[in-house]
Amino acid sequence: MTEFSSTEERIAFYLKQMEKAMPEIKRQIKVYEEAIKSGKKRKNKIEITRNV
C-alpha cells in the first residue's frame, strides 16, 4: 500500500487511478445503453478488467 504524507497527495493519486479506469467504464456503460435501446432480452457478457 502506498503511503502518503498529505491528503492532497492521496487525492491526486486516486484521481490518477480513476482516470486510467474511466475509458473502460465508459465503454461498458455504452454497451449496456445500446442493449437497452435495442430491446435485447439476453444479458451481454461484460469482462471487467483492471487498468493499473
Image (cartoon, rainbow, N blue to C red):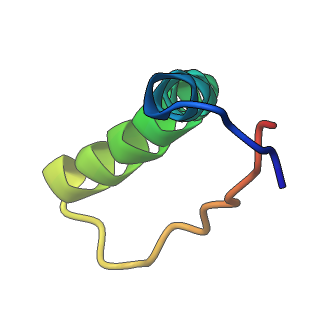
Q: Nearer the viewer, residue 20 or 12?
A: 12
Q: Residue at x 70, y 60 (%)?
A: 47
The one nearer the camera, 4 or 40, is 4
Q: Quadrant of the C terminus?
A: top right
Residue sitting farthest toward the front: 5
| Left or right, 5 with reference to 50 | left
Q: Nearer the viewer, residue 6 or 23?
A: 6
Up/down of 38 relative to 18, above or below = below
User: In the picture shown, does residue 20 fall above or below 52?
Assistant: above
Residue 39: give x, y in percent of width and height.
18, 62
**For the image shown, how many numbered marks are present on the structure?**
0
| Nearer-the-camera pick, 46 or 42 | 46
> Which image quarter: residue 16?
top right
Residue pictured at 75% horizontal, 51% vertical:
49
Position of residue 41 measured from the top left corner of the image (x, y, whole percent): 30, 78
Quadrant where the image shows the N terminus: bottom right
Q: Quadrant of residue 10?
A: top right
**x, y percent for residue 7:** 46, 34
* Residue positioned most to the bottom: 42
Relative to 47, 11 lies left or right:
left
Q: Is residue 43 above or below residue 28?
A: below
* Residue 9 coordinates in the image, percent (x, y): 56, 24
